[in-house]
Amino acid sequence: MTTEVVQRTALLRISGLTIDTEPGGTSVRLVDGVDLTVAAGERVALVGESGSGKSVTARALMRLDGSLAIGGSIRLGDTEILAQTERRLAAIRGSRIGMVFQDPMGALDPLQTIGAQVSEPLRQRGVRKKDALRRAAEVLSELGVARAHERLGAYPHEFSGGMRQRVVLAMALIGEPEILIADEPTTALDVRVQQQVLNLLDEVTRERGLGLLLITHDLGVVAGLADRVAVMYSGRIVEDRPVRALFADPLHPYTAGLLAAVPRLDVQLARMTTIPGAPPSPALRPAGCPFHPRCPVAMDRCASETPSMTATADGGRRACHLDRGSRN
């Protein structure tokens, strides 16, 4: 398979990102040396099992958890996020980076109206209440909320799950951000509503030229939306490649295991394919390649040597001792 390699200028650049627990007791490394980029107009999916470090990485980009020690570099254009004061971060959140959380009901304040919550990012920037509410109605209408102006006075419990997710998306978009982070945006939604939300993400990112970082464990979602996929395991990126190339020929055994475990309608199986074992606790991460205890093709060196990232022929990267797919 020949894959066209498209070079884009990175809008978001994460380099050597580390995240450690800090308060009380022994510090535990949750994320260990992550490098990742997102260009303007590019949709990048960050995938992996629960506990791999996906969501904590997303929250680190917004500096939302002060209990974690974050190292490395997170650059948005020329701005180093990790060097900003809380006051400056407040100006960046919502205006340059928008975030869609995985639980829309948990992300919304049940005691505040929809209008107040969607317009809040503009109010924080000094926009008059009347103008902010008018813009909130416009964004909600653009996202398919019928009679948006009338519904500004409604409360979250008066909206369905799909409509609440549209409200959360409106909150992320009203400040006209450059990058949108979507953390499991289809969790707890039925299949029909999931597709509506994904179509909406596809539409708004294309029309606005936004960079999208999609956090998900659902490879079906990735196949239909992402341009590039970064696979995360035990706090590290193990493969980062164009979506079509990765699905056609995964170059890391963990990626191959994830793809093999996806149910298929065109193949009749006696039993579901699974990856044996479970991901390690961050406090008990094994030496060498963290996947080696579960890997069907592990070699002796995998238990002692941590594989470095190597470039692949399709413009991607992978971290594996197996000698295949690397660019010489």
Image (cartoon, helix red, strand yellow):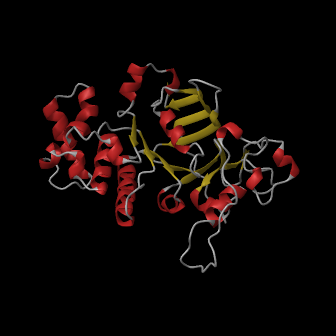
Q: Can residue 103 be seen?
A: yes
Determine the residue located farthest toward the front in the rendered image: 25
**Residue 317 located left or right of residue 138:** right
Residue 35 is left or right of residue 205, and the answer is right
Residue 43 visible? The answer is no
Q: Residue furthest right?
A: 300
Image point (23%, 29%), residue name: 123
Q: Quadrant of residue 180?
A: top left
Residue shown at 18%/45% (left/top)? 137
Q: What is the x, y in percent for residue 109? A: 28, 39
Is residue 65 or residue 236 the one in the foreground?
65
Q: Quadrant of residue 304?
A: top right
Q: Is residue 286 above or below residue 193?
A: above
Residue visible at 61% across and 65% down?
A: 261
For the image, the number of numbered tags is 0
Q: Residue 237: horizontal and vertical position, in percent? A: 65, 45
Q: Residue 50: image x %, image y %? A: 56, 50
Q: Position of residue 308 (x, y in %)?
A: 76, 42
Report the residue at 54% width, 60% height from top: 219
The answer to which of 306 and 187 lies nearer the viewer is 187
